[in-house]
Image: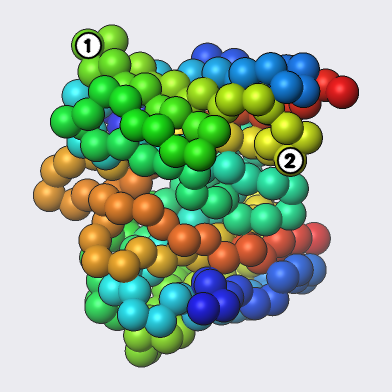
Amino acid sequence: GESVGLHLPTLSVQEGDNSIINCAYSNSASDYFIWYKQESGKGPQFIIDIRSNMDKRQGQRVTVLLNKTVKHLSLQIAATQPGDSAVYFCAENIRNRDDKIIFGKGTRLHILP
Amino acid sequence: DAGVIQSPRHEVTEMGQEVTLRCKPISGHDYLFWYRQTMMRGLELLIYFNNNVPIDDSGMPEDRFSAKMPNASFSTLKIQPSEPRDSAVYFCASSLRKTNEKLFFGSGTQLSVL
């Protein structure tokens, strides 16, 4: 069915450490995946995306890994900073007649000083 | 570019009243989306438009909800009559050419129905 879920609702990470946020998806027809960051009182903001023909994509301090065999997606944030505190959503595009982006429930990233 | 602009930022109304939420997408974007966000259900897609035409409204919860896009730079989401369970943050988003690419979100409208 159409479902994107997250393993951990809250993740606490020491400032300076790396963060890994995980996401499981259930639809093998999904061909495009996106990570969004949502700060308090704001709309979701695009971080990085990856298409199903790739396994890994890197941005500035962020890396997304896609494992299609187990339908798993992860976001890695290097050298976590206080400004990284937010809720992170993974989203998938389910490829069918009506492509649309479906969002997961979100993981809250809490940075410890 | 100012990004996606939504108004109002906050709306408090009484049950039974009509509520109209407004959105101005990024200029040149062909797609416009309305999402609703609650703690229980997360971000739900309500409806989306392509070139001002509604494409998929399967996420619209009831007939009390309606959305229009009279031109490329303006869309409304209307709830009539409103109910307390409609309380949520409503987001508008736009994308450039198709649905399977990154969305740009507005700041949202916090709706409280008393």
Q: Seen from this angle, which residue lies furthest right? A: A113
Q: CA distance from mark 1 to mark 2?
A: 33 Å
- Residue A87 sits in quarter: top right
- Residue A32 sits in quarter: top left
Judging depth in this view, the residue of A21 and B11 nearest the camera is A21
Q: As shown in the figure, which amino acid type bears the numbered disc 1? A: Thr
* Label ID, residue A54: none
Q: Is residue A26 visible?
A: no
Mark 1 — residue?
A69
Apparent side of residue B101 relative to residue B10 in the rendered image (left or right): left
Q: Is residue A63 visible?
A: yes
Disc 1 crowd rating (10 Å Cα; few below 14, some 14-19, many 20+) is few
Disc 2 crowd rating (10 Å Cα; few below 14, some 14-19, many 20+) is few
Judging depth in this view, the residue of A25 and B76 nearest the camera is A25
Assign a secondary structure to mark 1.
loop
Choose the circle earlier in sequence order: 1 or 2: 1
Residue B1 at x, y percent in the picture: 51, 78
B97 versus A45 height, above or below: below
> What residue is at 55 percent from the left and 51 percent from the top?
A45
Judging depth in this view, the residue of B66 and B93 nearest the camera is B93
> What residue is at 75 percent from the left and 68 percent from the top?
B10
Mark 2 — residue?
A83
Residue A8 at x, y percent in the picture: 59, 16
**Quadrant where the C terminus of chain B is found in the figure:** bottom right
> What residue is at 44 percent from the left and 72 percent from the top?
B66
Question: Callout 2: residue from which chain?
Answer: A
Q: Seen from this angle, which residue lies furthest left? A: A97
Residue A75 at x, y percent in the picture: 48, 26
